[in-house]
Image: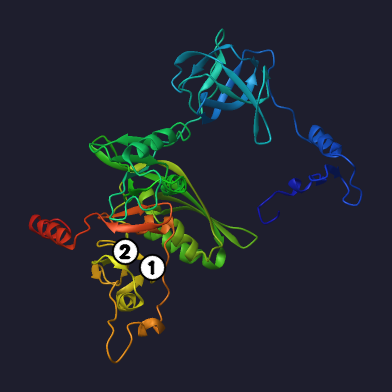
Amino acid sequence: FVELGAQEEQAEFETVYTNALTGAAGTDHRHIGPSLEPLFDAIVERIPPPDVASDAPAQLLVTTTTYDDYIGKVAVGRLQSGTLRPGQAVARIDHFGALTPAKVTQLFTFEGLARDEVDEARAGDIVAVAGVAGVSIGDTIADAADPRALPPIRVEEPTLRMTFAVNTSPFAGRDGTHVTSRKLRERLFAELERDVALRVAETGSPDTFIVSGRGELHLAILVETLRREGYEFQVSRPEVIMKEEGGRLLEPYEQLDIEVPADVVGAVVELAGQRRGTLLEMRYRDDGTVHCVYRIPTRGLLGFRQAFLTRARGQGVMNTLFADYGAQAGPIAARTLGSLVAFEAGTTTTFGLNAAQERGQLFLGPGVDVYEGMVVGEHIRERDLEVNVVKRKHLTNMRSSTSDIAVRLDGVRELSLDDAIEFLADDELLEVTPLAYRIRKRLLSKHDRGRLAGQRRKTGQPV
């Protein structure tokens, strides 16, 4: 309690001991009564009632939305004033003050996680309202006879985008249930009904969509959700959404709040500096922690979380909040090492992996199916290197083909979703299936990649 920075007056709180299974509660742990009455009495006594106006016209600020396959979009919020009933005429007031007439078709309140349909909701109730088309977070649902807007909630604009496309790898269709562009398109646009911070745009290709979100974590959660639902697709490396203003190209900046133990603050400050972060505030606390506030480009936060946890030895806490758009901060050191790329399809062997591990860090062990152009590890040098991880030791008169079974592979680094997205280079894609993450080159053939590199050299472009 003290380590969280609580004030002295906050220590004066009442404790109620309860047993939810038996429905018992009491203010003394030695004498717990037969019911939850002491808990309810404490709630009535200690918690102030909602500040509402029961006699005023109905006003509800939409704080979240859900989607129901049968009744459509549902607005959820607390009724600030008045009453609502099914069939009542209301007006939806958006962020710009525009009014759209609507009618409440169904009304629900909440009991635990369950939703109960009711005939009337009164001021102070948290309710779900169906029938208001086009509603979004921050809108006001008001009485149609006297529509009054509440201060709206502003939803921050996306700062990162990545492409979602149908899986085109040689292993396409092996694991997934939903593998077509139609299924992927339907699912992405359905997500817009639930996630107001998300943006989905179609491209010139019917198989590719641009998805924009509020950060790397936001997009990674969407990728993981689709994977668990049985979708199979591929995504690109996230890129920052720039904005042009007055002839200048601006990039998004975020406020980064960090709390770490004092003995690791030096390593964390160094990391933030490498990502072009500007230190705005640093406070040493009595509990031995340090609170730092940075202004940092969104570009600098790509892959930052994992590096931060490593530097802070798992003891750090970080939070980000969109700040503004500003001038470009200059180059940020990204991935400096190349990839180990399989140049032959097959199943990995200990013999092949043992030879490849001398050239870098492996991402997979023996017995894994791979295809040409699939990334199997990280090279120790800047350029990519093709390796044969499916090579077998042939049977001879002198030794068995399985004599390499005792070969010891160094630690294989299994990539999580966050690790894989962070690792991606511009010429790579992440193949996502219900059973696996696979990093691959956009051009799978070594010949095609070599020809493209030659064309770039001729035109003076970076290879």
Residue 31 is left or right of residue 87, and the answer is: right
178 versus 189 height, above or below:
below
Question: Which amino acid type is shown beneath numbered disc 1?
Answer: Leu
207 over 236 or under it: above or below = above
Residue 338 appearing in the image:
no
**Residue 205, image x, y percentages:** 24, 38
Nearest the viewer among 116 and 60 is 116
- Residue underneath mark 1: 364
**Residue drawn where x is 46% and y is 23% of the image:** 95
Q: Secondary structure at mark 2?
A: strand
Which quadrant: the C terminus? bottom left
Q: Which residue is mark 2?
A: 370
Q: Nearer the viewer, residue 320 or 145?
A: 145
In the rendered structure, the answer to whether residue 196 lies left or right of residue 338 reads right
Q: Is residue 178 above or below residue 431?
A: above
**What residue is drawn where x is 80% and y is 32%?**
44
Q: In the displayed structure, does residue 70 sit left or right of residue 248?
A: right
Q: How is the image coloured?
A: rainbow
Q: Residue flagged by tag 2: what amino acid is it?
A: Val
Could you tell me which residue is drawn at 43 percent across and 65 percent down? 414
Measure the C-alpha gap from mark 1 to mark 2: 10 Å
